[in-house]
Image (spheres, rainbow, N blue to C red):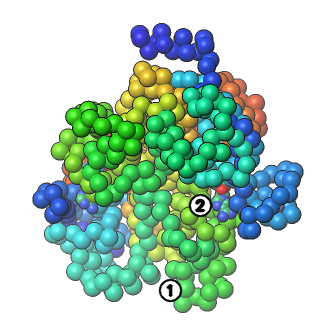
Protein backbone atom coordinates (compact mmCIF):
# COMPACT_ATOMS: atom_id res chain seq x y z
CA UNK A 1 0.00 0.00 0.00
CA UNK A 2 1.31 3.40 -0.98
CA UNK A 3 -1.16 5.66 0.72
CA UNK A 4 -3.56 5.15 3.56
CA UNK A 5 -5.77 7.98 4.69
CA UNK A 6 -7.84 7.71 7.83
CA UNK A 7 -10.62 10.04 8.88
CA UNK A 8 -9.01 13.10 7.36
CA UNK A 9 -10.59 16.37 8.39
CA UNK A 10 -9.84 19.92 7.48
CA UNK A 11 -11.53 22.93 8.96
CA UNK A 12 -10.35 26.32 7.82
CA UNK A 13 -10.49 29.00 10.48
CA UNK A 14 -10.81 32.46 9.07
CA UNK A 15 -9.84 34.66 11.99
CA UNK A 16 -10.55 37.95 10.27
CA UNK A 17 -14.25 37.21 10.07
CA UNK A 18 -14.42 34.79 12.95
CA UNK A 19 -15.73 31.95 10.80
CA UNK A 20 -14.94 28.32 10.32
CA UNK A 21 -15.43 26.22 7.26
CA UNK A 22 -15.15 22.48 7.10
CA UNK A 23 -13.78 21.44 3.74
CA UNK A 24 -13.00 17.81 4.58
CA UNK A 25 -15.26 15.96 6.93
CA UNK A 26 -13.80 12.52 7.50
CA UNK A 27 -12.17 11.09 4.39
CA UNK A 28 -10.71 7.58 4.52
CA UNK A 29 -9.29 5.41 1.78
CA UNK A 30 -6.18 3.62 0.70
CA UNK A 31 -4.40 3.46 -2.63
CA UNK A 32 -2.10 0.84 -4.05
CA UNK A 33 0.97 1.04 -6.18
CA UNK A 34 0.07 1.83 -9.78
CA UNK A 35 -3.51 2.66 -8.98
CA UNK A 36 -5.28 5.57 -10.64
CA UNK A 37 -8.03 7.20 -8.62
CA UNK A 38 -10.26 9.79 -10.22
CA UNK A 39 -11.87 12.39 -7.99
CA UNK A 40 -15.12 14.04 -8.96
CA UNK A 41 -17.69 16.20 -7.22
CA UNK A 42 -19.34 19.57 -7.27
CA UNK A 43 -17.47 22.83 -6.95
CA UNK A 44 -16.51 23.35 -3.32
CA UNK A 45 -16.90 19.70 -2.35
CA UNK A 46 -13.30 19.44 -1.15
CA UNK A 47 -11.44 17.86 -4.08
CA UNK A 48 -8.57 20.36 -4.16
CA UNK A 49 -8.37 20.49 -0.39
CA UNK A 50 -7.89 16.71 -0.28
CA UNK A 51 -4.98 16.88 -2.73
CA UNK A 52 -3.50 19.89 -0.94
CA UNK A 53 -3.63 18.09 2.42
CA UNK A 54 -1.66 15.19 0.97
CA UNK A 55 0.89 17.56 -0.57
CA UNK A 56 0.79 19.48 2.71
CA UNK A 57 0.00 22.86 1.23
CA UNK A 58 -2.91 22.55 3.66
CA UNK A 59 -2.45 21.35 7.22
CA UNK A 60 -5.09 18.77 8.11
CA UNK A 61 -7.07 19.38 11.28
CA UNK A 62 -7.36 15.71 12.18
CA UNK A 63 -6.76 12.26 10.76
CA UNK A 64 -3.72 10.61 9.30
CA UNK A 65 -2.12 10.33 5.88
CA UNK A 66 0.26 7.42 5.85
CA UNK A 67 2.53 7.40 2.85
CA UNK A 68 4.94 4.42 2.88
CA UNK A 69 4.96 4.32 6.70
CA UNK A 70 5.38 8.07 7.06
CA UNK A 71 2.51 10.06 8.50
CA UNK A 72 2.50 13.14 6.31
CA UNK A 73 0.35 15.03 8.78
CA UNK A 74 3.13 14.74 11.34
CA UNK A 75 6.20 14.76 9.12
CA UNK A 76 8.69 17.58 9.63
CA UNK A 77 8.87 20.33 7.05
CA UNK A 78 12.24 19.15 5.77
CA UNK A 79 10.94 15.62 5.33
CA UNK A 80 8.05 16.99 3.32
CA UNK A 81 10.42 19.04 1.20
CA UNK A 82 12.51 15.95 0.53
CA UNK A 83 9.44 13.92 -0.42
CA UNK A 84 8.17 16.66 -2.72
CA UNK A 85 11.54 16.81 -4.40
CA UNK A 86 11.95 13.11 -4.90
CA UNK A 87 8.69 11.22 -4.68
CA UNK A 88 5.51 13.26 -4.73
CA UNK A 89 4.46 15.31 -7.75
CA UNK A 90 1.65 17.87 -7.73
CA UNK A 91 -0.05 20.04 -10.33
CA UNK A 92 -2.22 22.86 -9.04
CA UNK A 93 -5.62 23.67 -10.51
CA UNK A 94 -4.41 27.17 -11.28
CA UNK A 95 -2.21 28.08 -14.18
CA UNK A 96 0.57 29.54 -12.10
CA UNK A 97 4.17 29.25 -13.19
CA UNK A 98 7.41 29.87 -11.41
CA UNK A 99 8.56 33.36 -12.42
CA UNK A 100 12.02 34.24 -13.71
CA UNK A 101 13.09 30.67 -14.50
CA UNK A 102 13.18 29.43 -18.08
CA UNK A 103 10.96 26.60 -19.21
CA UNK A 104 13.72 24.02 -19.46
CA UNK A 105 15.13 24.95 -16.07
CA UNK A 106 11.72 24.78 -14.39
CA UNK A 107 11.35 21.23 -15.63
CA UNK A 108 14.97 20.19 -15.12
CA UNK A 109 15.08 21.18 -11.47
CA UNK A 110 13.56 17.99 -10.00
CA UNK A 111 16.19 15.93 -11.81
CA UNK A 112 18.96 18.10 -10.42
CA UNK A 113 17.54 17.39 -6.95
CA UNK A 114 17.86 13.74 -7.83
CA UNK A 115 21.55 14.19 -8.57
CA UNK A 116 21.60 14.58 -12.35
CA UNK A 117 24.11 16.97 -13.80
CA UNK A 118 22.57 20.20 -14.99
CA UNK A 119 23.33 19.35 -18.59
CA UNK A 120 21.76 15.91 -18.42
CA UNK A 121 18.75 17.26 -16.56
CA UNK A 122 18.20 19.97 -19.15
CA UNK A 123 18.44 17.42 -21.94
CA UNK A 124 15.80 15.21 -20.38
CA UNK A 125 13.62 18.20 -19.66
CA UNK A 126 13.81 19.35 -23.27
CA UNK A 127 12.97 15.86 -24.43
CA UNK A 128 9.88 15.67 -22.25
CA UNK A 129 8.76 19.18 -23.20
CA UNK A 130 9.09 18.33 -26.88
CA UNK A 131 7.02 15.22 -26.31
CA UNK A 132 4.36 17.43 -24.82
CA UNK A 133 4.63 19.53 -27.97
CA UNK A 134 6.03 22.65 -26.38
CA UNK A 135 7.45 24.66 -29.23
CA UNK A 136 11.20 24.87 -29.67
CA UNK A 137 11.37 28.63 -29.30
CA UNK A 138 9.69 28.44 -25.88
CA UNK A 139 12.21 26.12 -24.30
CA UNK A 140 14.52 28.89 -23.23
CA UNK A 141 11.86 31.57 -22.69
CA UNK A 142 10.08 32.44 -19.44
CA UNK A 143 6.68 30.74 -19.09
CA UNK A 144 4.95 33.75 -17.48
CA UNK A 145 3.72 34.95 -20.87
CA UNK A 146 2.83 31.51 -22.21
CA UNK A 147 -0.65 30.39 -23.15
CA UNK A 148 -2.82 28.61 -20.59
CA UNK A 149 -2.29 25.22 -22.18
CA UNK A 150 1.44 25.74 -22.42
CA UNK A 151 1.68 26.71 -18.75
CA UNK A 152 -0.32 23.65 -17.82
CA UNK A 153 1.97 21.35 -19.81
CA UNK A 154 5.09 22.95 -18.30
CA UNK A 155 3.71 22.40 -14.79
CA UNK A 156 2.80 18.83 -15.62
CA UNK A 157 6.26 18.15 -17.04
CA UNK A 158 7.86 19.42 -13.85
CA UNK A 159 5.61 17.18 -11.78
CA UNK A 160 6.29 13.98 -13.71
CA UNK A 161 9.87 14.29 -14.91
CA UNK A 162 11.38 12.46 -11.98
CA UNK A 163 8.76 9.70 -12.15
CA UNK A 164 7.25 10.29 -8.74
CA UNK A 165 5.82 7.40 -6.83
CA UNK A 166 2.74 9.49 -5.97
CA UNK A 167 1.24 12.00 -8.37
CA UNK A 168 -1.46 14.49 -7.37
CA UNK A 169 -3.17 16.18 -10.30
CA UNK A 170 -5.76 18.92 -9.86
CA UNK A 171 -7.58 19.48 -13.15
CA UNK A 172 -4.38 18.94 -15.12
CA UNK A 173 -6.10 18.96 -18.52
CA UNK A 174 -8.54 21.85 -18.07
CA UNK A 175 -6.68 24.13 -20.48
CA UNK A 176 -5.68 21.47 -22.99
CA UNK A 177 -7.26 20.70 -26.31
CA UNK A 178 -8.23 17.17 -27.31
CA UNK A 179 -4.88 16.41 -28.95
CA UNK A 180 -2.70 17.40 -26.01
CA UNK A 181 -5.10 15.77 -23.59
CA UNK A 182 -4.52 12.52 -25.46
CA UNK A 183 -0.75 12.90 -25.04
CA UNK A 184 -1.18 13.54 -21.35
CA UNK A 185 -3.45 10.52 -20.98
CA UNK A 186 -0.80 8.35 -22.64
CA UNK A 187 1.85 9.64 -20.26
CA UNK A 188 -0.33 9.08 -17.23
CA UNK A 189 -1.01 5.51 -18.34
CA UNK A 190 2.69 4.90 -18.81
CA UNK A 191 3.52 6.23 -15.35
CA UNK A 192 0.75 4.12 -13.90
CA UNK A 193 2.25 1.08 -15.57
CA UNK A 194 5.61 1.87 -14.05
CA UNK A 195 3.95 1.88 -10.65
CA UNK A 196 3.11 5.51 -9.99
CA UNK A 197 -0.01 5.97 -7.89
CA UNK A 198 -2.12 8.77 -9.30
CA UNK A 199 -4.89 10.80 -7.69
CA UNK A 200 -6.51 13.26 -10.03
CA UNK A 201 -9.53 15.52 -10.24
CA UNK A 202 -11.11 15.68 -13.68
CA UNK A 203 -14.34 17.08 -15.01
CA UNK A 204 -13.84 15.21 -18.23
CA UNK A 205 -15.43 11.79 -17.91
CA UNK A 206 -13.86 10.57 -21.16
CA UNK A 207 -10.42 10.93 -19.60
CA UNK A 208 -11.56 9.11 -16.49
CA UNK A 209 -12.86 6.23 -18.55
CA UNK A 210 -9.44 5.82 -20.13
CA UNK A 211 -7.33 6.23 -17.02
CA UNK A 212 -8.91 5.57 -13.69
CA UNK A 213 -9.43 2.32 -11.85
CA UNK A 214 -11.69 3.78 -9.20
CA UNK A 215 -13.61 7.00 -8.75
CA UNK A 216 -14.35 8.91 -5.58
CA UNK A 217 -17.37 11.14 -5.84
CA UNK A 218 -17.10 13.85 -3.21
CA UNK A 219 -19.86 15.81 -1.56
CA UNK A 220 -19.65 18.23 1.37
CA UNK A 221 -16.15 17.15 2.30
CA UNK A 222 -16.86 13.43 2.27
CA UNK A 223 -16.46 10.67 -0.24
CA UNK A 224 -20.14 10.15 -0.98
CA UNK A 225 -19.78 7.37 -3.51
CA UNK A 226 -16.89 5.15 -4.44
CA UNK A 227 -16.56 2.31 -6.87
CA UNK A 228 -15.14 1.10 -10.14
CA UNK A 229 -14.98 3.82 -12.77
CA UNK A 230 -17.83 2.52 -14.90
CA UNK A 231 -20.06 1.93 -11.89
CA UNK A 232 -19.74 5.51 -10.69
CA UNK A 233 -20.07 7.00 -14.15
CA UNK A 234 -23.28 5.08 -14.66
CA UNK A 235 -24.64 6.34 -11.36
CA UNK A 236 -24.13 10.07 -11.98
CA UNK B 1 -39.87 36.18 -26.25
CA UNK B 2 -38.56 39.62 -25.65
CA UNK B 3 -35.07 38.31 -26.24
CA UNK B 4 -36.22 36.82 -29.51
CA UNK B 5 -37.59 40.07 -30.85
CA UNK B 6 -34.49 41.92 -29.85
CA UNK B 7 -32.45 39.18 -31.37
CA UNK B 8 -33.98 39.54 -34.80
CA UNK B 9 -33.85 43.32 -34.63
CA UNK B 10 -30.20 43.04 -33.74
CA UNK B 11 -29.49 40.70 -36.58
CA UNK B 12 -31.43 42.83 -39.04
CA UNK B 13 -29.50 45.94 -38.25
CA UNK B 14 -25.92 44.82 -37.78
CA UNK B 15 -24.64 47.95 -36.12
CA UNK B 16 -20.90 47.70 -35.78
CA UNK B 17 -19.50 48.02 -32.28
CA UNK B 18 -15.89 47.05 -32.59
CA UNK B 19 -13.47 47.04 -35.45
CA UNK B 20 -10.08 45.39 -35.14
CA UNK B 21 -7.45 46.00 -37.79
CA UNK B 22 -4.25 44.02 -38.30
CA UNK B 23 -3.54 43.43 -34.61
CA UNK B 24 -0.09 41.98 -34.11
CA UNK B 25 1.96 40.99 -31.08
CA UNK B 26 5.53 39.89 -31.59
CA UNK B 27 7.75 38.41 -28.92
CA UNK B 28 11.36 38.98 -29.83
CA UNK B 29 14.58 38.78 -27.94
CA UNK B 30 15.47 42.39 -28.62
CA UNK B 31 12.08 43.83 -29.54
CA UNK B 32 13.44 44.95 -32.85
CA UNK B 33 12.29 42.37 -35.38
CA UNK B 34 11.24 44.39 -38.41
CA UNK B 35 11.35 41.44 -40.76
CA UNK B 36 8.56 40.27 -42.92
CA UNK B 37 7.24 36.93 -41.64
CA UNK B 38 6.65 35.30 -44.96
CA UNK B 39 5.06 32.14 -43.77
CA UNK B 40 4.31 30.78 -40.30
CA UNK B 41 4.60 32.82 -37.17
CA UNK B 42 8.27 32.40 -36.42
CA UNK B 43 10.65 34.86 -38.06
CA UNK B 44 13.13 32.83 -40.05
CA UNK B 45 15.72 35.58 -39.77
CA UNK B 46 15.76 36.24 -36.05
CA UNK B 47 13.51 33.67 -34.38
CA UNK B 48 10.93 36.17 -33.09
CA UNK B 49 7.46 34.77 -32.53
CA UNK B 50 4.20 36.39 -33.57
CA UNK B 51 1.66 35.34 -30.94
CA UNK B 52 -0.98 37.27 -32.89
CA UNK B 53 -0.45 38.28 -36.47
CA UNK B 54 -2.52 40.67 -38.57
CA UNK B 55 -5.82 39.76 -37.00
CA UNK B 56 -8.74 41.82 -38.29
CA UNK B 57 -12.45 41.41 -37.62
CA UNK B 58 -15.58 43.31 -36.74
CA UNK B 59 -18.05 42.69 -33.98
CA UNK B 60 -21.60 43.97 -34.09
CA UNK B 61 -23.71 45.18 -31.21
CA UNK B 62 -25.12 42.28 -29.24
CA UNK B 63 -23.19 39.71 -31.24
CA UNK B 64 -21.37 36.72 -29.78
CA UNK B 65 -18.13 35.81 -31.52
CA UNK B 66 -16.36 32.69 -30.44
CA UNK B 67 -12.64 32.15 -30.95
CA UNK B 68 -11.39 28.59 -31.18
CA UNK B 69 -7.95 27.19 -31.92
CA UNK B 70 -5.25 25.00 -30.46
CA UNK B 71 -3.14 25.84 -27.47
CA UNK B 72 -0.79 28.73 -28.17
CA UNK B 73 -2.71 29.94 -31.20
CA UNK B 74 -3.02 33.47 -29.80
CA UNK B 75 -6.55 33.50 -28.38
CA UNK B 76 -5.76 34.81 -24.90
CA UNK B 77 -3.19 37.22 -26.25
CA UNK B 78 -5.82 38.72 -28.53
CA UNK B 79 -8.26 39.24 -25.64
CA UNK B 80 -5.58 40.68 -23.40
CA UNK B 81 -4.61 43.15 -26.10
CA UNK B 82 -8.23 44.27 -26.42
CA UNK B 83 -8.41 44.69 -22.65
CA UNK B 84 -5.14 46.69 -22.64
CA UNK B 85 -3.24 44.11 -20.58
CA UNK B 86 -0.77 43.50 -23.39
CA UNK B 87 0.46 46.22 -25.67
CA UNK B 88 0.25 45.22 -29.32
CA UNK B 89 3.30 45.54 -31.50
CA UNK B 90 1.05 47.14 -34.08
CA UNK B 91 -2.57 47.30 -35.15
CA UNK B 92 -5.67 49.35 -34.41
CA UNK B 93 -9.02 48.96 -32.70
CA UNK B 94 -12.06 51.23 -32.89
CA UNK B 95 -15.09 51.21 -30.63
CA UNK B 96 -18.10 52.95 -32.13
CA UNK B 97 -19.17 54.41 -28.79
CA UNK B 98 -15.78 56.01 -28.27
CA UNK B 99 -15.09 59.29 -30.06
CA UNK B 100 -17.45 58.35 -32.83
CA UNK B 101 -15.45 55.24 -33.62
CA UNK B 102 -12.74 57.39 -35.18
CA UNK B 103 -9.99 57.06 -32.60
CA UNK B 104 -7.67 54.07 -32.36
CA UNK B 105 -8.01 52.82 -28.78
CA UNK B 106 -4.32 52.04 -28.53
CA UNK B 107 -3.44 55.67 -29.19
CA UNK B 108 -5.13 57.03 -26.05
CA UNK B 109 -3.43 57.62 -22.70
CA UNK B 110 -3.55 55.12 -19.86
CA UNK B 111 -6.23 57.05 -17.95
CA UNK B 112 -8.62 56.80 -20.90
CA UNK B 113 -7.76 53.15 -21.31
CA UNK B 114 -8.64 52.56 -17.68
CA UNK B 115 -11.95 54.32 -18.19
CA UNK B 116 -12.70 52.20 -21.23
CA UNK B 117 -12.02 49.05 -19.23
CA UNK B 118 -14.08 50.21 -16.29
CA UNK B 119 -17.08 51.59 -18.16
CA UNK B 120 -17.26 49.73 -21.43
CA UNK B 121 -15.68 46.33 -20.91
CA UNK B 122 -15.76 43.23 -18.79
CA UNK B 123 -13.13 40.47 -18.79
CA UNK B 124 -13.05 36.90 -17.57
CA UNK B 125 -9.48 35.59 -17.53
CA UNK B 126 -8.52 32.03 -18.32
CA UNK B 127 -6.93 31.74 -14.90
CA UNK B 128 -9.58 32.85 -12.40
CA UNK B 129 -6.94 34.21 -10.06
CA UNK B 130 -5.99 36.88 -12.59
CA UNK B 131 -9.46 38.40 -12.54
CA UNK B 132 -10.17 38.82 -8.84
CA UNK B 133 -8.53 40.39 -5.81
CA UNK B 134 -7.72 37.60 -3.33
CA UNK B 135 -7.69 39.81 -0.24
CA UNK B 136 -11.23 41.09 -0.52
CA UNK B 137 -14.61 39.41 -0.26
CA UNK B 138 -16.72 38.12 -3.12
CA UNK B 139 -19.17 40.98 -2.81
CA UNK B 140 -16.25 43.39 -2.38
CA UNK B 141 -14.80 42.17 -5.66
CA UNK B 142 -17.99 42.94 -7.54
CA UNK B 143 -18.43 46.24 -5.71
CA UNK B 144 -14.87 47.13 -6.65
CA UNK B 145 -15.74 46.88 -10.32
CA UNK B 146 -18.92 48.94 -9.80
CA UNK B 147 -17.04 51.65 -7.90
CA UNK B 148 -14.53 51.81 -10.72
CA UNK B 149 -17.47 52.31 -13.07
CA UNK B 150 -18.54 55.27 -10.93
CA UNK B 151 -21.46 53.67 -9.16
CA UNK B 152 -21.92 55.70 -5.98
CA UNK B 153 -25.12 54.59 -4.29
CA UNK B 154 -24.11 52.10 -1.64
CA UNK B 155 -27.49 50.39 -1.57
CA UNK B 156 -27.51 49.85 -5.32
CA UNK B 157 -23.94 48.57 -5.29
CA UNK B 158 -24.81 46.08 -2.61
CA UNK B 159 -27.95 44.88 -4.34
CA UNK B 160 -26.22 44.50 -7.66
CA UNK B 161 -23.34 42.55 -6.12
CA UNK B 162 -25.60 40.17 -4.28
CA UNK B 163 -27.80 39.70 -7.32
CA UNK B 164 -24.89 38.67 -9.50
CA UNK B 165 -23.33 36.41 -6.88
CA UNK B 166 -26.59 34.55 -6.46
CA UNK B 167 -27.03 34.29 -10.20
CA UNK B 168 -23.61 32.64 -10.42
CA UNK B 169 -24.56 30.31 -7.56
CA UNK B 170 -22.14 31.51 -4.91
CA UNK B 171 -23.70 30.28 -1.63
CA UNK B 172 -25.16 33.20 0.29
CA UNK B 173 -23.18 32.51 3.44
CA UNK B 174 -19.97 32.99 1.45
CA UNK B 175 -20.74 36.45 -0.01
CA UNK B 176 -18.53 38.21 2.55
CA UNK B 177 -15.69 35.68 2.62
CA UNK B 178 -12.31 36.52 1.14
CA UNK B 179 -12.01 35.08 -2.34
CA UNK B 180 -8.55 33.69 -1.68
CA UNK B 181 -10.35 31.10 0.41
CA UNK B 182 -12.59 30.02 -2.45
CA UNK B 183 -12.35 26.87 -4.52
CA UNK B 184 -11.35 27.16 -8.17
CA UNK B 185 -14.88 26.97 -9.48
CA UNK B 186 -16.06 29.55 -6.97
CA UNK B 187 -13.27 31.96 -7.96
CA UNK B 188 -14.31 31.55 -11.56
CA UNK B 189 -17.91 32.38 -10.74
CA UNK B 190 -16.92 35.51 -8.78
CA UNK B 191 -14.90 36.55 -11.78
CA UNK B 192 -17.90 36.16 -14.05
CA UNK B 193 -20.09 38.21 -11.66
CA UNK B 194 -17.49 40.92 -11.64
CA UNK B 195 -17.13 41.02 -15.40
CA UNK B 196 -20.88 41.39 -15.94
CA UNK B 197 -21.37 43.88 -13.10
CA UNK B 198 -21.11 47.17 -14.97
CA UNK B 199 -23.32 46.04 -17.88
CA UNK B 200 -20.40 46.27 -20.27
CA UNK B 201 -21.06 46.81 -23.94
CA UNK B 202 -18.13 44.52 -24.69
CA UNK B 203 -17.59 41.32 -22.74
CA UNK B 204 -14.38 39.32 -23.14
CA UNK B 205 -14.55 35.72 -21.92
CA UNK B 206 -11.47 33.49 -21.89
CA UNK B 207 -12.56 29.88 -21.35
CA UNK B 208 -15.28 30.98 -18.91
CA UNK B 209 -16.36 27.49 -17.95
CA UNK B 210 -13.16 25.50 -17.58
CA UNK B 211 -12.75 23.74 -14.31
CA UNK B 212 -16.48 23.86 -13.60
CA UNK B 213 -18.45 20.69 -13.40
CA UNK B 214 -20.81 20.02 -16.23
CA UNK B 215 -24.07 20.92 -14.52
CA UNK B 216 -22.77 24.26 -13.19
CA UNK B 217 -21.23 24.84 -16.60
CA UNK B 218 -24.58 24.53 -18.33
CA UNK B 219 -26.39 26.77 -15.87
CA UNK B 220 -23.67 29.41 -16.04
CA UNK B 221 -23.76 29.42 -19.82
CA UNK B 222 -27.52 29.87 -19.67
CA UNK B 223 -27.05 32.75 -17.30
CA UNK B 224 -24.39 34.40 -19.41
CA UNK B 225 -26.55 33.97 -22.47
CA UNK B 226 -29.68 35.38 -20.89
CA UNK B 227 -27.93 38.49 -19.54
CA UNK B 228 -26.03 38.86 -22.77
CA UNK B 229 -29.24 38.75 -24.81
CA UNK B 230 -31.30 40.85 -22.47
CA UNK B 231 -28.79 43.65 -22.51
CA UNK B 232 -27.43 43.05 -25.96
CA UNK B 233 -23.84 42.74 -24.78
CA UNK B 234 -21.37 42.11 -27.58
CA UNK B 235 -19.21 39.20 -26.52
CA UNK B 236 -15.96 37.62 -27.60
CA UNK B 237 -15.56 34.19 -26.09
CA UNK B 238 -12.50 32.02 -26.30
CA UNK B 239 -13.18 28.35 -25.83
CA UNK B 240 -11.74 25.01 -26.79
CA UNK B 241 -15.15 23.44 -26.38
CA UNK B 242 -17.10 23.42 -29.62
CA UNK B 243 -20.26 22.54 -27.72
CA UNK B 244 -19.98 25.79 -25.81
CA UNK B 245 -19.25 27.72 -28.99
CA UNK B 246 -22.26 26.16 -30.63
CA UNK B 247 -24.68 27.07 -27.86
CA UNK B 248 -23.54 30.66 -27.45
CA UNK B 249 -21.93 31.99 -30.57
CA UNK B 250 -23.35 33.66 -33.67
CA UNK B 251 -20.02 33.43 -35.42
CA UNK B 252 -16.83 31.47 -34.92
CA UNK B 253 -13.32 32.59 -35.73
CA UNK B 254 -10.66 29.90 -35.98
CA UNK B 255 -7.08 30.80 -35.05
CA UNK B 256 -3.93 28.87 -35.80
CA UNK B 257 -0.39 30.04 -35.21
CA UNK B 258 -1.50 33.59 -34.43
CA UNK B 259 -3.54 34.09 -37.57
CA UNK B 260 -7.21 33.71 -38.37
CA UNK B 261 -7.55 30.79 -40.77
CA UNK B 262 -11.31 30.78 -41.09
CA UNK B 263 -14.36 32.54 -39.78
CA UNK B 264 -18.07 32.24 -40.39
CA UNK B 265 -21.46 31.47 -38.91
CA UNK B 266 -21.16 29.17 -35.92
CA UNK B 267 -23.28 26.36 -37.30
CA UNK B 268 -21.65 26.65 -40.69
CA UNK B 269 -18.12 26.37 -39.30
CA UNK B 270 -19.17 23.24 -37.42
CA UNK B 271 -21.15 21.66 -40.25
CA UNK B 272 -19.01 22.60 -43.14
CA UNK B 273 -15.53 23.70 -42.14
CA UNK B 274 -13.49 24.75 -45.16
CA UNK B 275 -9.98 24.96 -43.86
CA UNK B 276 -7.96 21.81 -43.33
CA UNK B 277 -7.00 22.92 -39.85
CA UNK B 278 -10.60 23.56 -38.78
CA UNK B 279 -11.61 20.14 -40.03
CA UNK B 280 -8.83 18.55 -38.05
CA UNK B 281 -9.80 20.49 -34.96
CA UNK B 282 -13.44 19.52 -35.21
CA UNK B 283 -12.65 15.88 -35.94
CA UNK B 284 -10.29 15.63 -33.00
CA UNK B 285 -13.09 16.83 -30.73
CA UNK B 286 -15.69 14.47 -32.11
CA UNK B 287 -13.32 11.55 -32.51
N1 LIG C 1 8.75 34.76 -24.65
C1 LIG C 1 8.12 34.19 -25.69
N2 LIG C 1 8.81 33.82 -26.79
C2 LIG C 1 8.19 33.26 -27.82
N3 LIG C 1 6.87 33.03 -27.87
C3 LIG C 1 6.14 33.38 -26.81
C4 LIG C 1 6.73 33.99 -25.66
N4 LIG C 1 5.75 34.23 -24.77
C5 LIG C 1 4.60 33.79 -25.32
N5 LIG C 1 4.85 33.30 -26.55
C6 LIG C 1 3.86 32.70 -27.43
O1 LIG C 1 2.72 33.51 -27.47
C7 LIG C 1 1.59 32.68 -27.65
C8 LIG C 1 0.57 33.09 -26.60
O2 LIG C 1 -0.55 32.31 -26.82
P1 LIG C 1 -1.97 32.60 -26.18
O3 LIG C 1 -1.84 32.74 -24.68
O4 LIG C 1 -2.62 33.73 -26.87
O5 LIG C 1 -2.61 31.21 -26.58
P2 LIG C 1 -4.05 30.62 -26.48
O6 LIG C 1 -4.56 30.51 -27.86
O7 LIG C 1 -4.83 31.41 -25.49
O8 LIG C 1 -3.76 29.14 -25.95
P3 LIG C 1 -4.41 28.26 -24.75
O9 LIG C 1 -5.57 27.57 -25.34
O10 LIG C 1 -3.33 27.28 -24.41
O11 LIG C 1 -4.71 29.17 -23.61
C9 LIG C 1 2.03 31.24 -27.50
O12 LIG C 1 2.12 30.61 -28.72
C10 LIG C 1 3.39 31.38 -26.87
O13 LIG C 1 4.20 30.34 -27.28
N1 LIG D 1 -7.54 28.53 2.23
C1 LIG D 1 -8.87 28.39 2.47
N2 LIG D 1 -9.44 29.07 3.48
C2 LIG D 1 -10.74 28.94 3.73
N3 LIG D 1 -11.59 28.14 3.03
C3 LIG D 1 -11.06 27.43 2.04
C4 LIG D 1 -9.68 27.52 1.68
N4 LIG D 1 -9.44 26.71 0.63
C5 LIG D 1 -10.63 26.14 0.32
N5 LIG D 1 -11.60 26.57 1.18
C6 LIG D 1 -13.00 26.19 1.15
O1 LIG D 1 -13.10 24.79 1.23
C7 LIG D 1 -14.17 24.32 0.42
C8 LIG D 1 -13.64 23.24 -0.52
O2 LIG D 1 -12.77 23.84 -1.47
P1 LIG D 1 -11.97 23.02 -2.57
O3 LIG D 1 -11.02 23.98 -3.20
O4 LIG D 1 -11.40 21.81 -1.96
O5 LIG D 1 -13.16 22.64 -3.56
P2 LIG D 1 -13.12 21.82 -4.94
O6 LIG D 1 -13.92 20.59 -4.73
O7 LIG D 1 -11.72 21.67 -5.39
O8 LIG D 1 -13.95 22.80 -5.90
P3 LIG D 1 -13.69 23.26 -7.44
O9 LIG D 1 -14.28 22.19 -8.29
O10 LIG D 1 -14.49 24.54 -7.53
O11 LIG D 1 -12.24 23.48 -7.62
C9 LIG D 1 -14.73 25.54 -0.30
O12 LIG D 1 -15.89 25.96 0.37
C10 LIG D 1 -13.64 26.56 -0.16
O13 LIG D 1 -14.15 27.87 -0.13
MG1 LIG E 1 -10.64 22.53 -6.93
MG1 LIG F 1 -5.41 31.02 -23.52
ZN1 LIG G 1 12.90 38.94 -37.39
Residue B190 position within the rendered picture, expressed as x and y whole percent measured from the top left: 34, 44
Q: In this view, which residue lies farthest toward the left?
A: A18
Q: In the figure, A18 relative to A34: above or below?
A: above
Q: Residues within 10 Å of mark 2 (few under 14, many from 20)?
A: some
Give the secondary structure at mark 1. Answer: helix
> In the rendered image, which quarter is residue B153 located in?
top left
Q: Is residue A155 above or below residue B147?
A: below
Query: Mark 1 highlights which residue?
Result: A113
Q: Residue at x 56, y 23 (%)?
A: B61
- Mark 2 within 8 Å of ligand 1, using the beta carbon: yes
A195 or B285: nearer the eye?
A: B285
Dot 1: within a 10 Å radius of its alpha carbon, few (fewer than 14), some, or many (20 or more) residues?
A: some
The residue tagged 2 is A145
Give me the residue at 54% from left, 44% from top. B112
- Marks 1, 2: nearer the viewer: 2
- Quadrant position of residue B143: top left
The image position of residue A164, as x and y in percent, is 46, 75
Please report the residue visible at 45 percent of the width from the left and 41 percent of the height from the top. B118
A116 above or below A204? below
x, y (%) of residue B46? 82, 65
Ligand 1: image quarter: bottom right
x then y, percent, for residue B1: 41, 10
Instruction: Measure the alpha-carbon separation of dots 1 and 2.
Output: 26 Å
Quick one: quadrant of the C terminus of chain B?
A: top right
Amino acid sequence: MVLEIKDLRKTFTMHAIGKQLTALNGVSFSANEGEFIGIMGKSGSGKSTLLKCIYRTCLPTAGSIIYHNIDLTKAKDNEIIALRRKEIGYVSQFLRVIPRVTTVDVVAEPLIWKGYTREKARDEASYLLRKLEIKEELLNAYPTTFSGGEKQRVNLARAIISRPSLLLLDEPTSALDAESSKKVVEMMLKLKQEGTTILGTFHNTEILKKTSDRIFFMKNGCIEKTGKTHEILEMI
Amino acid sequence: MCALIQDSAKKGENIMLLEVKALTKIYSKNDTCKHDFEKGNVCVKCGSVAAVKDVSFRLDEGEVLSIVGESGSGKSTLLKILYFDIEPTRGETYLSSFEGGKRNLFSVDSKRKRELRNFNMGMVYQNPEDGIKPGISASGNVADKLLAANWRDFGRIKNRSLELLSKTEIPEQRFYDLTKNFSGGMKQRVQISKAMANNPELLLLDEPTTGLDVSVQARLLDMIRSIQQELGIATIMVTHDFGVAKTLADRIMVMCGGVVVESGLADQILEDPQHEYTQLLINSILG
